[in-house]
């Protein structure tokens, strides 16, 4: 799961500049990143707790990326016809 710093702040993750100690390669080039734990992510009726996330500066990421740290915790997920279906 990847989120930007503004989203992290909105969900209560208060990161310091010193937390951004990792260098990652993104579609927008190299960026600094921080590691964080999201208490819970809910999508529809599915809730997953304690999800590891990567936080990037706002200029490096303008959307939320739902990743394998969330998807691997589900019973199953499918992608068909550009639709992601989640099963808990």
Image (cartoon, rainbow, N blue to C red):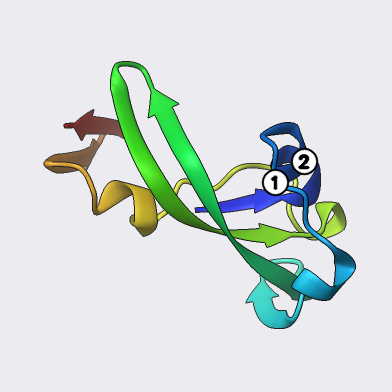
Residue at figure coordinates x 76%, y 71% from the top left: 19
Label 2, label 1: how far apart the Cα atoms are:
5 Å
Side of 32 where 17 appears, left or right: right
Residue at figure coordinates x 13%, y 42% from the top left: 76
Residue 82 in view? no
**Image quarter of residue 72:** bottom left
Looking at the picture, how far across and down is residue 20, in whole percent? 77, 72
Provide the secondary structure element on which disc 2 rests: helix
Looking at the picture, how far across and down is residue 69, in whole percent? 37, 57
Q: State the residue position of label 1.
A: 13
Q: Examine the rendered structure and indicate whether residue 68 appears above or below residue 63.
A: below
Q: How many marks?
A: 2
Circle 2 packing at 10 Å, graded few (<14), some (14-19), many (20+), is few
Q: State the residue position of label 2.
A: 9
Please identify the quadrant where the C terminus is shown: top left
| Disc 2 and disc 1 in contact, CB within 8 angstroms | yes
* Residue at the far left in the pictured view: 75
Residue 22 in view? yes
Residue at figure coordinates x 23%, y 32% from the top left: 86
Query: Is 43 or 83 nearer to us in this picture?
Result: 43
Looking at the picture, how far across and down is residue 80, in whole percent? 22, 36
Circle 1 packing at 10 Å, graded few (<14), some (14-19), many (20+), is some
**Image quarter of residue 35:** bottom right
């Amino acid at each position: 799961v990847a989120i930007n710093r503004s989203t992290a702040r909105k969900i209560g993750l208060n990161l310091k500049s010193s937390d951004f100690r990792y260098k990652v390669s993104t579609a927008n080039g190299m960026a600094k990143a921080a590691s964080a734990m999201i208490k819970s992510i809910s999508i529809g009726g599915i809730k997953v707790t304690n999800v590891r996330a990567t936080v990037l500066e706002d200029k490096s990421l303008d959307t939320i990326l739902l990743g394998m740290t969330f998807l691997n915790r589900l019973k199953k997920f499918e992608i068909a016809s550009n639709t992601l279906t989640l099963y808990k």
